[in-house]
Amino acid sequence: MNVSKPVFFSAILLSFLSAMMISQVFNAMAIDGGGNPFDTVWEAIEDLQTQIDEIELTPGPQGPMGPQGLQGPPGGFGAPDYDSGWVSFESVSSSLDHGLGTKNLFVYLVGKQFSLLEPAGWRVHQKKIGTDNDGDDLWGVYWSLIDENTIYVQRAFDEWRWEYFRVYIWIIQ
């Protein structure tokens, strides 16, 4: 077989370079205990991450105060001045002493009934506030202030939706 000199020298050079590369890979594996040669790189990255995590930031001095912002919207109601808690309608009316000493009030009345509709349970509502007569039956619930310290809550005789009621009251300034 007749091989030209350039092809022969190219084959020898390629073999030499391959041997050098394989030698470098084995040296890297020997350095880090015979594992993957990239493990050394990952260890260096993890070491840098540890150093970054241990940096403690020291805040500088506070800067000057900025300009005053725009006035926001007025706040909500906040907590009520009186909360009756849930009161059972054992009779058709109840008088509650709220003790606020004024008739300048905002009153919020809610009811509660048990429902068998899925999911079964107690439902809070405002159904039939005010009374309504449909011919034969009288429905609904209403409230009125008796004096500066007492509120009266009345349930119509045929009303079945209001098993319990709750009164929240805020003093209007």
Image: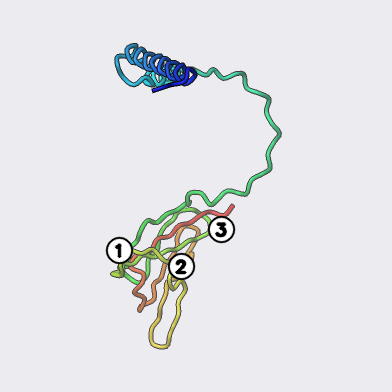
* Relative vertical location of residue 68 with respect to residue 104 in this rendering, above or below: above
- The residue nearer to you, when weighing 52 against 97, is 52
Tell me if I can see residue 54 in this picture.
Answer: no
Q: CA distance from mark 3 to mark 2?
A: 15 Å
Q: Rate crowding at label 2 as few (under 14), some (14 to 19) or many (20 or more) other CA atoms within 10 Å.
A: some
In the rendered image, which quarter is residue 141 located in? bottom left
Q: CA distance from mark 1 to mark 3?
A: 36 Å
Q: Is residue 31 left or right of residue 53?
A: left
User: Three-letter amino acid code at disc 2?
Assistant: Trp
Which residue lies most toward the right here? 67
Q: Rate crowding at label 3 as few (under 14), some (14 to 19) or many (20 or more) other CA atoms within 10 Å.
A: few
Number of the front mark, 1 or 3: 1
Q: Residue at x 41, y 70 (%)?
A: 154
* Relative vertical location of residue 18 with respect to residue 165 in this rendering, above or below: above
Q: CA distance from mark 1 to mark 2?
A: 26 Å
Report x, y in % for residue 40: 38, 17
Report x, y in % for residue 120: 29, 65
Give the residue at mark 2: 143
Q: Residue at x 42, y 54 (%)?
A: 83
User: Three-letter amino acid code at disc 3?
Assistant: Asn
Give the residue at mark 3: 104
Tell me if I can see residue 136 in this picture.
Answer: yes
Q: Residue at x 69, y 36 (%)?
A: 68
**Helix, strand or loop status at disc 1:** strand
**Dot placed on the residue nearer the N-terminal end, 1 or 2:** 1
**Dot placed on the residue nearer the N-terminal end, 3 or 2:** 3
Give the residue at mark 1: 121
**Helix, strand or loop status at disc 2:** strand
**Dot placed on the residue nearer the N-terminal end, 1 or 3:** 3
User: Three-letter amino acid code at disc 1?
Assistant: Gly
Residues tagged 3 and 2 counted as in contact (Cβ below 8 A): no
- The residue nearer to you, when weighing 68 against 14, is 14
